[in-house]
């Protein structure tokens, strides 16, 4: 049962991810990307990381994709369909990236030992918000506080850029 | 195994049956209530074989009308996205009910049946996440219509939804701090406590400011008066201008489902969920004085009924608000959201934290 759901989610993620680059219309690429993010969130939820799954939906599918959508909405449709930047150059770069990626995928298959850690029983409450929070605010206190300050600076910057009018 | 699936399906049928029926009746109640408030007679014309029952056939008549209307897609627009947008609106409004608990755990024939469709341990965040995805139906509807007015309407809607989502999320933090959990059934159960022995420890008593902020932001998320700028059905015209037939009906229905959803979430978070004051899992009781025992199934049924009544009360209250207040101007809307609601929500978190530190 769980395997079946995993394969559905994985298939959905792969199909929608390839649809992102294969679609001719920019809007469809954006919508495919949203589906990809949601199906990855689905996998997080099945890997006993429900908080990560929900944050994925709130932040990536719910907030970051909104920006993408706004940009696409404001562009003129016909131009986005036909515009191509240096097709020859993009082909070469794409080919290099594809070969590198293929090697990355094939190499681990030939290894004798598996890269995945051996299956161990999870501690009770693993992946719950309480356990995540207690790790973040004890073991990783400094990074999380620094991230908080960074975000605060960004917020202040946005308020400054958008709020103050030059008379 | 199969029994579990059947029980879950029955729970889904009960919840969605309740929600969809209440949403349909609300479409009539909105007109009738506005009529009563404005000293008119209101929608009472639809009849079946001469029977009118106050006009309760109007939802059925409306549905038949919309299903038989021409379904028109703008030829310059995007047919696929145009069709998908109303379904998204319905989906995001309905999926919220999956985590709202509507009763205490039912012990029957040796089984424990939690009266909640999915007991996720991310609870409230699930509601925030999928409620937030409702944004896409609005934006895609405006964009796919290939109409400048629709696009402007969807931009207004997007700005409003994003702005008030912030206040909504921040006001929930207070309730999470007070009850120490983000699971909705834990929160509902924690609201069965009493302060000073006789005042029910409901969210509205623990978080009065949080309740006002949450309710205001939630009404703004449903895009209804006084926050109905995205629609402005009387003059400006919003994101669903280019919709007709049942697709328009789906947006309409989605709005009423959102009303029921907001009522459900407000009840679960701030009005004790399924708790009835002075009724616990033994029976009617008064703390420290007496207890009148009641059978378990009866108590659970009473609690489910209490939850339904609270939801209906909030639906009624939201209709009342809709026909009482005028609409915000756009700049007032934005200033209210960012300069009033968000700072107050932050203050609420601060004061809640101080209280919890002191006591």
Image (spheres, coloured by chain):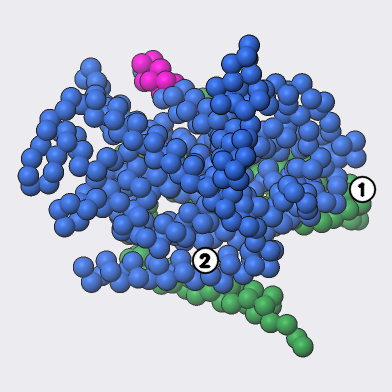
Q: Residue under circle 1?
A: A78
> Does B285 sit left or right of B96 as displayed?
left
The numbered mark at residue A5 is: none
Spot the residue most to the left: B289
Q: Is residue B274 above or below residue B5?
A: below
Depth check, mark 1 against mark 2: the one in front is: 2
B183 horizontally vs B131: left or right: left
Task: Where is residue A102? Give x, y as percent.
Answer: 68, 43
Viewport quadrant of the N terminus of chain B: top left
Chain drawn green, letter?
Answer: A
Look at the image and give the colour of chain B.
blue
Q: Residue furthest bottom?
A: A167
Where does the image place residue B208, in percent across and percent down from the top left? 37, 60
Residue pictured at 78% horizontal, 53% vertical: B236
Residue B174's quadrant in the figure? bottom left
Is B306 on the left or on the right of B167, as rendered?
left
Task: Name the residue at 56% across, 72% down.
Answer: B339
Asked if the stretch drawn in magenta spans residue B310, the answer is no
On-image quarter of the C terminus of chain B: bottom left
Q: Which residues are magenta?
A: B2-10
Q: Secondary structure at mark 1?
A: helix
């Amino acid at each position: 049962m769980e395997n079946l759901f995993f394969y559905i989610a994985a298939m959905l993620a792969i199909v929608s991810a390839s649809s992102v680059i294969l679609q001719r219309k920019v809007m469809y690429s954006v919508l495919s990307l949203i589906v990809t993010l949601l199906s990855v969130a689905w996998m997080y939820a099945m890997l006993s990381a429900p908080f990560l799954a929900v944050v994925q939906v709130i932040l990536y599918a719910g907030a970051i994709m909104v920006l993408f959508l706004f940009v696409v909405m404001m562009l003129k449709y016909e131009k986005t369909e036909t515009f191509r930047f240096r097709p020859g150059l993009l082909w070469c770069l794409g080919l290099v990236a594809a070969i590198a990626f293929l090697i990355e995928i094939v190499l681990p298959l030939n290894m004798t030992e598996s890269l995945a850690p051996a299956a161990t029983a999870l501690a009770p409450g693993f992946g719950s918000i309480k356990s995540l929070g207690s790790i973040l605010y004890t073991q990783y206190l400094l990074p999380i506080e620094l991230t908080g300050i960074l975000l605060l600076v960004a917020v202040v910057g946005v308020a400054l850029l958008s709020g103050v009018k030059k008379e | 195994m199969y029994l579990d699936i059947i029980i879950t399906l029955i729970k889904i049928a009960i919840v969605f049956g309740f929600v969809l029926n209440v949403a349909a009746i609300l479409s009539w109640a909105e007109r009738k209530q506005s009529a009563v408030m404005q000293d008119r007679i209101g929608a009472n014309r639809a009849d079946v074989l001469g029977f009118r029952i106050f006009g309760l056939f109007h939802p059925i008549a409306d549905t038949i009308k919309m299903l038989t209307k021409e379904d028109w897609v703008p030829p310059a627009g995007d047919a696929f996205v145009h069709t998908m947008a109303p379904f998204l609106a319905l989906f995001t409004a309905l999926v919220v009910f999956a985590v709202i608990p509507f009763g205490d755990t039912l012990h029957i024939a040796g089984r424990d049946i939690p009266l909640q469709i999915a007991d996720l341990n991310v609870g409230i965040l699930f509601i925030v996440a999928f409620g937030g995805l409702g944004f896409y139906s609005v934006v895609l509807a405006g964009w796919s219509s290939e109409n400048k007015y629709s696009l402007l309407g969807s931009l207004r809607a997007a700005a409003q939804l994003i702005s008030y989502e912030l206040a909504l999320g921040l006001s929930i933090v207070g309730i999470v701090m007070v009850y120490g959990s983000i699971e909705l059934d834990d929160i509902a159960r924690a609201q069965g406590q009493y302060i000073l022995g006789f005042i029910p420890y409901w969210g509205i008593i623990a978080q009065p400011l949080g309740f006002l902020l949450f309710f205001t932001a939630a009404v703004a998320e449903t895009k209804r008066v006084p926050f109905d700028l995205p629609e402005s059905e009387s003059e400006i015209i919003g994101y669903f201008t280019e919709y007709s037939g049942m697709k328009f009906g789906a947006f309409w229905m989605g709005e009423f489902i959102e009303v029921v959803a907001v009522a459900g979430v407000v009840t679960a978070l701030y009005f004790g969920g399924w708790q009835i004051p002075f009724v616990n899992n033994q029976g009617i009781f008064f703390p420290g004085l007496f207890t009148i025992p009641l059978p378990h199934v009866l108590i659970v049924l009473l609690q489910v009924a209490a939850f339904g009544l609270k939801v209906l009360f909030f639906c009624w209250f939201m209709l009342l608000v809709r026909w009482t207040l005028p609409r915000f101007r756009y700049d007032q809307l934005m200033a209210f959201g960012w300069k009033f609601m968000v700072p107050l929500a932050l203050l609420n978190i601060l004061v809640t934290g101080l209280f919890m530190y002191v006591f």
